[in-house]
Amino acid sequence: MTDTLEPFGSRLRHAMDTRGPLCVGIDPHASLLSAWGLNDDIAGLERFTRTTVEALADRVAVLKPQSAFFERFGSRGIAVLEKAVEEARSAGALVLMDAKRGDIGSTMAAYAATYLDKDSPLFSDAVTVSPYLGFGSLRPALDAAAVSGAGVFVLALTSNPEGAEVQRATAADGRSLAQLMLDHMATENAGARPLGSVGAVVGATLGDAGVNLDINGPLLAPGIGAQGATPADLPRVFGSAVGNVVPSVSRGVLKHGPDVAALRQSAERFAEEVVAAVSGV
């Protein structure tokens, strides 16, 4: 690893342009391990994770391990996660740690040190965070990311139905809370080229998002595949910002394992469909 990384937004733009704009989740939950013929134990976790990284890390733009599925195995699960992060990054994939951390003060700073400090064994190219303790609570993560050349993806409009009761609520000035958070992100990204390093998480299943998504940053779009959204839905949801969308698919690709060739073919097919959908705008 070099001492100084280019800003995450620049590295992500390059990865999207050269490898295609696709993020594949690494979600080793019990049902997927079973579908692969693996036991729900450390050996199964290691096999699942190693196979996914081997199949995809040298060809997709982003790999997104879901931290909770590793944490449930305790320290041995975290060790598997550490190795996966290292091997995926060595193979050229950007690693987005899906941890959805959100807290205040020194606790948020500790989360930032865990995922955004280059000396940490869990250092990732970006991490997901929750802003609903106030956008200012994210400052330790935003500052740590800026120092290390990493990125931060902030929850804005998530694909789960329950999210609307908070995210669609109205702030004092009449904006939705989601739009308020997006406007904060746009401020953080002002002037960045070719792309800011503060991204938003916006579900691909939302239909018309109903917010201004032009934040000059990446838009992580979960919900492709098993949750029902397709690449063809992206222009309708994201409008003029669709060129900055990083669609995220997990089960839609992972269900084809443990066959490495099948995993690769599925990811390539999704990436091609995304490019076709976006280029048609």
Image (cartoon, helix red, strand yellow):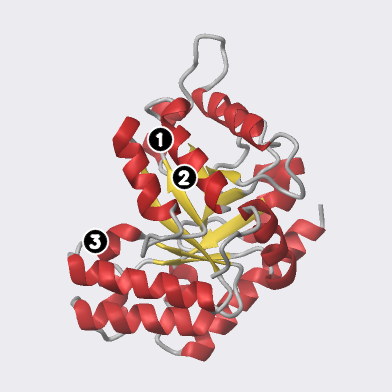
Please give the name of the residue rendered at 56% of the width and 83% of the height, measured from the top-left corner.
Answer: 264
SS of the residue at dot 3? helix
Task: Give the side of residue 193 with respect to residue 212, left or right.
Answer: right
In the displayed structure, 97 sits above or below 205; it is: below
Please give the name of the residue rendered at 39% of the width and 74% of the height, measured from the top-left corner.
Answer: 84
Q: x, y percentage for residue 92?
A: 58, 75
Residue 151 visible here:
no
Labels 3 and 1: the sequence-earlier one: 3
Q: x, y percentage for residue 142?
A: 51, 39
In the displayed structure, 211 sits above or below 100; it is: above
Q: Which label is found at residue 71?
A: 3
Q: Judge by depth and name the residue closer to the eye, 260 or 187.
A: 187
Labelled pair 3, 1 in contact (Cβ < 8 Å): no
Mark 3, Cα crowd under 10 Å, few <14 / some 14-19 / many 20+, is: some
Q: Judge by depth and name the residue closer to the eye, 53 or 112.
A: 112
What whole-number distance in Å separates the C-alpha atoms at marks 2 and 1? Answer: 7 Å
The amino acid type found where label 3 is placed reads: Glu
What whole-number distance in Å separates the C-alpha atoms at marks 3 and 1? Answer: 24 Å
Dividing the image into 4 quarters, which one contains the N terminus? bottom right
Q: Which residue is mark 2?
A: 159
Please give the name of the residue rendered at 58% of the width and 53% of the height, measured from the top-left corner.
Answer: 149
Labels 3 and 2: the sequence-earlier one: 3
Q: Which residue is mark 1?
A: 163
Q: Quadrant of residue 73?
A: bottom left
Labelled pair 2, 1 in contact (Cβ < 8 Å): yes
Please give the name of the residue rendered at 69% of the width and 68% of the height, measured from the top-left corner.
Answer: 20
